[in-house]
Image (cartoon, helix red, strand yellow):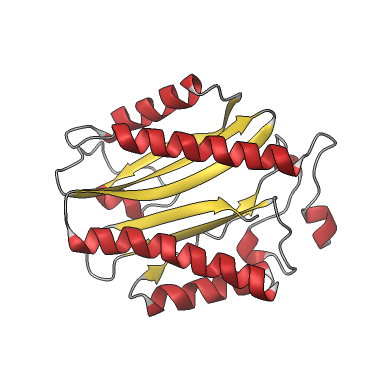
Amino acid sequence: MNSTHKEAVGEQFSLDAMQHARVMTWNAVNAIAADVRPGMRESEANALALRILKDLGMDRIWHPVLVRFGENTLRTFKQRSNGDPVLADNDIFFIDLGAVWAKHEGDAGATFVCGDDPDMQACAQAARTIYDEVEQHWRATGCAGVDLYVYAAQRANAHGFRLNVDIKGHRVSDFPHAIYKAGDLGDFAATPAAGVWILEIQIAHPTRPFGAFHEDLLV
């Protein structure tokens, strides 16, 4: 399968619609983060996230809502949370949303910190910084998806964190993108096109049991 097939889209696909889906998903991420409070259980935060998405008028979700607290921030999308932890006064959490807006897929994720733990704050900031560095590398070099994740691992190490190499980005498009069998961005051997790939960065603190996550559409 060549890169053209891997970046195939449907007849209704629009870059403007993808940008709209991106904006709406980030609106939801920020609204959810503003309402997550210490004392809330992880299951309650996930229910809150789904309510906010519905209130904002999404068409539907295309992947399960995911809010992870504390040690569960080390777990990948496919791994179940360990228990139903309560968010502490000094804690870390991330939000990962995949929702359809106007028949196009939005996917966004970010990490947030409650309290003033400096390691947690540094970890959350590092995930965003590494994302920005890798995105700029894509813009500047036009390198293949495989090389983007080699660079991501290097940047994570430079910031003192470990990249989770099992999380390597994925396709999006007009819903449903799953009919286009593209594989992971980190296995894509060509230059990723704008508007159809999600860059994911998940890192782990080197000594403490938590991590951070950031993802967005490459545009």
Instruction: Point out residue 198 in the picture as x, y percentages from the top left corner.
Output: 60, 53
Q: Left or right? Give the position of 15 relative to 218.
A: right
Which residue is found at the position 50% from the left and 53% from the top? 215
Which residue is found at the position 29% from the left and 28% from the top? 44
Which residue is found at the position 76% from the left and 46% from the top? 180
**Foreground pick, 56 / 188:** 56
**Foreground pick, 103 / 84:** 103
Quadrant hosting residue 1: bottom right
Which residue is found at the position 17% from the left and 33% from the top? 39
Instruction: Point out residue 27 in the picture as x, y percentages from the top left corner.
Output: 48, 36
Q: Left or right? Give the position of 129 relative to 42.
A: right
Which quarter of the figure is the C terminus placed in? bottom right
Q: Left or right? Give the position of 168 relative to 205.
A: right
Instruction: Point out residue 25 in the picture as x, y percentages from the top left corner.
Output: 52, 37
**Image vertical order of residue 194 relative to residue 19, above or below:** below
Instruction: Point out residue 111 in the picture as x, y percentages from the top left corner.
Output: 36, 50
